[in-house]
Each structure stands twice: as structure tokens, then as C-alpha cells.
Amino acid sequence: MKKPWGGRFKESTDQLMERFNASIGFDKKLYAYDIQGSIAHCKMLAKCKIISVPESKKIISGLQQILGEFESGKFQCSDALEDIHMNIERRLLDIIGPVGGKLHTARSRNDQVCLDVRLYLRAEAKEILSRLHEVEKTLLAVAKDTIDFIMPGYTHLQRAQPISLSHHILAYLEMLHRDRDRISDNLKRIDIMPLGSAALAGTNFPIDRSYVAKLLNFSVVSNNSMDSVADRDFMIEFCSAASILMMHLSRFCEEIVLWSSSEFDFIELSDAFSTGSSIMPQKKNPDAAELIRGKSGRIYGNLMALLTLMKSLPMAYNKDLQEDKEPLFDTVDTVKICLDVFNGMIKTATFKKIPEKNMKSSGFLTATDLADYLVLRDVPFREAHEITGKTVAYCLDKGKNLEELKLKELSKISSKFDSKVFEYISLENSVDRKNVYGGTARNQIKKQMRRWQKILKEEK
Ligand code: ARG
């Protein structure tokens, strides 16, 4: 097949080289953006009198026909035409004849492909933001329902202090909202119009780049033609934000896996988002959570692939850059499905109230409160810590928990204890006394929930 760039070649391309060089297998995903960009470019060429209006009309109707062919699955892609850009251009020539060859005036595939991926990523980043918003709303709803669910808070995966489950959930809402901010911020750097940079130096033709930007709804036009065609940092930034997001989802999923075990028994996942075992009939496995945790690895891998791809590329365009698309597409597709599955899994899960017996029987969750009680009786905190440590050791010896001790026993350890101590170290009082901004006191949580309610409403 004759190549669009075939003029200076005497021999035809080796079949192996043709297959190796082709990106159409994956960049056909960009067809709609490529056509959208070409239509805008064509309108601009006519406006600037570089081509005539009748010519531009012919080109645009040809492009629209091609769009229809893609949408109805009729378009025949060919490896010999390398990529989405040349596949579309060749088809345009087939449909409207040689005038189709005018479309590529003042343009190179180098700026064209940048335009396509920017259009693609702008749309997909917005899509991801809206899915993230759904997840945030789900978390807020769970937080509302679970404010009275007192559970152990952990450090080192050892029981530490009692907290409200809401507080735990809202911690993830904070993380995911920062992810949202990162992607929104990234959008500013995606939303830059590169067309007009041509191969690397700009173009000889008197084009109107701002007009193209306006037609395609871009906020700004790129400032340096070499940077425009060579840079992929907007993608790396996206993959980095996606990696952080997946890291957050993965942490939560790790907890879901733990919590749904009989050892923890804090959550029951719905049948709809669980799977069974082909050998063990009793099993109900948290595969959704495990897969999200697992998929975070490939998202980090995609980020690493892009960073490594770029690290030694001389200016400006190099064919290496064709390798940017698969990691980017995979990141977008994976993040989207992970957000949807995560949302479904959380929405349909049952969070369980942890029996008080379980909370009291191990871990000495209110030991810090016991120490603080002594501090209120003027014992320096370090001493209070020591006394409480001794109390815990005493309990361990006797096989008791703190609440089961008699005042007589406590008084032997320190004369500062009195009968009010037991109320002070109740789980509920312990939670509600953390009444500092950002603390787990239910008062504070309610304040935060009101804040989130407002933020999530405003941002939709
Ligand atoms: N398929 C190519 C890519 O994805 C398009 C740009 C090709 N440019 C070139 N000078 N060969 O990067």
C-alpha cells in the first residue's frame, strides 16, 4: 500500500517493520477526537483563506462520514497506514478525492497526536472526577449512618484508642478529595491547545491558533512549538494523581479485606460484590477489594513506564512517544472501573456495630484516658503513663480488662484514682471527649459532615 509519506522511498516497508511500527491497534480509540480536531483545523484553514470554503465543506462532510463509519463499526483499519491519523486521512482521500490532501496543510502528526490525547484526557479526567464525586457521596452517606458505631482505632495494627467508624470513613473522604483536587489541577495543564506547532518549529502558513482553541474549547494556546510536540508531563501528572488515588483505594480495600474476615468481623460485603470458591463451598471472598488493591500495582507501573519513556528523549518529537498511549489508556480505563466497583462494593456493604464486649475484652483501648484522668488530678503525664502501664500489667496478670477492676485494686496502684474514673474511661466518653477540631468526638464529626455536605453539593 502506498504510504502517505512514500515519496522519497524506493523500496516498500518490510512486513515485520509495518507491524512493529503500527499503533492503530490501540490509537483507534482516539478516532472521535482526531476527527473533531481535524474539523476545527479545517474550519480554521478556510477562515484564514489557506483553503477555500467549498474545499473545507467537502473535507468536513468526508470527515463526518468517516465518523459515522467508526460508530457503526464499518471502518476498516490498516496496519500499513500506521496510526489513526493516516488511516483517517487515507479514507478521506478515498471518499472526496485529492482535495482531502489539503487537510494536512500547516499540520504534522506530531501536533495532531498531542491534540488528540489532550482532547481525550480532558474528557476522561472530567469523567473520573464525576465518578470520584459519586464515591465521595457514598462515603459521606456511610459516615452518616455509622456515627454511633464505636470501633477500635489502630496503630501498628494494634488496638489503640476508640473511635467512631464515621471518623475512619471521613479520613478516606479527605484523601479522595485531595485526589480530586489533584486531577482538577492537572486539568489546567491538560487544557492547552498544541495545534499549529506542526512538526516542531511552527508553520509557514498564516494560521489562527486561537480560533482553533476557541472551536475546541481550550482555555489557552501552547507557547512553544517544540515543547508542545515533545512534552508529555500532563500525562505523567495524570498517572501520578491516578497512582495516589489508587494507593488510597488500595489502603481502604486492604481494610475491607481485613474487616470482612471472621477475625475482625466489622463488615459484611454484599453477595453482589463478592465471589465464591470453586472448591470450598463455605467461602465468600472479597475479590472486588482484592482486585482494586491488585490493580493499583499496574497503575504505578504505568506511571513508571511513562517516566522512563521520557527520561532521555532529546527534543523534540521521537517515535518513542507512540509508547505513551497504552499506559495512559490503561490507567484511565482501570481507574474508572475501580471507582465504580469500589462505589458499588461500599454502597451495598453492611457495616457491623462491634459488640461492646469485644471492644472491652482486649487491647485496653481506654488506657490513654486512664492516664489522662490522673493528669487531671495533677499527676505529670509521664508518671501517669507509668502508673497506667503498671495497671495494664496488673490486668494482664489477673486476666481482667480495665473496666472490670475494683476501685480497691486501682487505689493500691495509685492513690489518685477515685470512683469517677470508671465513667471517665467508658468507650463513649473516651470518643466524645476528643472534642478538638479534627478529633473523633461525635460533635466534631457532625461538624465535618456538615462541611462535606456543603462541599459535595457545591462541587457537583
Ligand atoms: N502514531 C504516532 C504517535 O503516536 C503519531 C505521530 C507520528 N509522528 C511521526 N513523526 N512519525 O506518536
Image: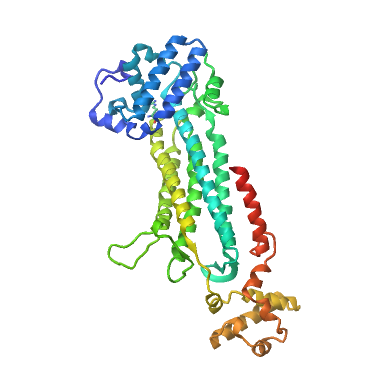
Residue 342 vs 97, above or below: the answer is below
Side of 113 relative to 393 (left or right): left
Of 377 and 227, the residue lying toward us: 377
Where ligand 1 lies, by quadrant?
A: top left
- Figure coloring: rainbow
Rendered residue at 55%/58% (across/down): 142
Of 363 and 425, the residue lying toward us: 425
Side of 20 relative to 445 (left or right): left
Residue 407 vs 167, above or below: the answer is below
Of 172 and 353, the residue lying toward us: 353
Rendered residue at 49%/23% (across/down): 195
Q: Quadrant of the C terminus?
A: top right
Direction right: furthest residue = 378
Q: Quadrant of residue 434?
A: bottom right
Q: Position of residue 169 (x, y in %)?
A: 56, 59
Q: Position of residue 372 (x, y in %)?
A: 69, 74
Residue 199 vs 351, above or below: the answer is above
Q: Position of residue 41 (x, y in %)?
A: 47, 20
Rendered residue at 44%/9% (across/down): 54
Is residue 366 at least partly visible in the picture? Answer: yes
Q: Quadrant of the N terminus?
A: top left
Of 148 and 228, the residue lying toward us: 148
Total residue callouts: 0
Rendered residue at 25%/17% (across/down): 10
Q: Quadrant of residue 61?
A: top left
Q: Position of residue 210 (x, y in %)?
A: 56, 21
Side of 382 relative to 325 (left or right): right
Is residue 51 at least partly visible in the picture? Answer: no
